[in-house]
Image (spheres, rainbow, N blue to C red):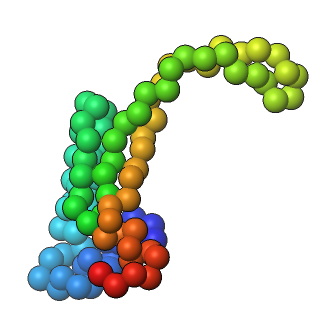
Amino acid sequence: MIRSELIQKIAAENTHLTQRDVEQIVGTVFREIIEAMARGDRVELRGFGAFSVKVRDARTGRNPRTGEAVDVERKAVPFFKTGKLLRDRLNNREV
């Protein structure tokens, strides 16, 4: 599912909201998750999962084509851990 499909589905299930209202709500939710992660905060959506940031230390890597050593800088990467409810649903366990 892509963002526009999510917006359409929410708008269809909530006829009292306009498409524009739903777009703003979805945009605000995503923006707040991004901003929280940029600050290094953890975002938990109960039953769905938790978004967090992990930091990978600087290291020496290798260019796969040439085999030459390459310095890889320290970087932050997004991480998602599924919640129990989602994991159980994906594995067809009763919820």
- Indicate whether 16 appears above or below 35: below
Residue at 17% of width from left, 85% of height from top?
A: 15
Q: Is residue 23 visible?
A: no
Of 3 and 50, nearer the camera is 50
Q: Residue furthest front?
A: 93
Q: Position of residue 79 (x, y in %)?
A: 42, 44
* Residue 56 falls left or right of residue 23: right
Residue at 24% of width from left, 36% of height from top?
A: 41
Q: Position of residue 42 (x, y in %)?
A: 26, 41
- Indicate whether 30 appears above or below 65: below
Residue at 50% of width from left, 20% of height from top?
A: 57
Q: Position of residue 92 (x, y in %)?
A: 44, 82
Of 92 and 40, nearer the camera is 92
Q: Position of residue 13 (x, y in %)?
A: 23, 85
Q: Residue furthest left?
A: 16
* Residue 33 falls left or right of residue 58: left
Of 26 and 95, nearer the camera is 95
- Image quadrant of residue 24? bottom left
Q: Is residue 83 visible?
A: yes
Quadrant showing the N terminus: bottom left
